[in-house]
Structure formats: structure tokens, C-alpha cells
Amino acid sequence: MARICWIGIFVNPVVMLDYYLSDSPNNQTGWVIEDFGSLMMQAKVEQDLATVLNKYK
């Protein structure tokens, strides 16, 4: 038996959360929340990982 899956290769959750941006080609569900996109853009420019992780709480 084998289990195949994909996991993020980085500690930063942006790797997986990018899939849910409204303009992502991988957002096949069409899920859109404008506040989420805004928070993601802020998190992408922040260099301190602790500050980025606090944005997701």
C-alpha cells in the first residue's frame, strides 16, 4: 500500500494558502474573500516569520 500526497515544503503557510487566492489558477472552487487576498499580500512582503504567522490567527 502507498499513500500519495503533497505537503508544503516550507514552514511558511503561504505555500499552501496561495491556492485560495482569487487570481490563482489552482483556485478551481472560485472561492473569493477580499480580506483574505489583502492579508496574503501583506504576509508576502513581511520578512519576519513570527509576524506572518500571527496574521493567520
Image (tube, grey):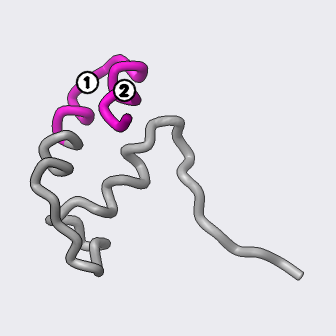
Mark closer to the chain start, 1 or 2: 1
Q: Main secondary structure of the magenta part?
A: helix
Q: Give the residue number, with chain letter if any, for mark 2.
A: 54
Q: Which residue is mark 1?
A: 46
Dot 1: element: loop
| Residue 53 left/right relative to 23 | right
| Residue 50 drawn above or below residue 24 | above
Badge count: 2
Amino acid type of the residue tagged 2 in the rendering: Asn
Q: Nearer the viewer, mark 1 or mark 2?
A: 2
Q: Quadrant of residue 16?
A: bottom left
- Residue drawn at point x = 64 percent, y = 69 percent: 5
Residue 44 part of the magenta-drawn span: yes
Q: State the extent of the magenta-drawn residues as a range.
A: 41-57
- Position above or below: 4 against 33: below
Can you name the residue that lies furthest to the right here?
A: 1
Kind of element beneath mark 2: helix
Mark 2 closeness class: few <14, some 14–19, many ≥20 residues within 10 Å: few
User: Can you name the residue that lies furthest to the front here?
Assistant: 57
Residue lying at 56% horizontally and 47% vertically, measured from the top left: 9
Which one is nearer the viewer's eye here, 55 or 27?
A: 55
Say which of 25 and 27 sits in front: 27
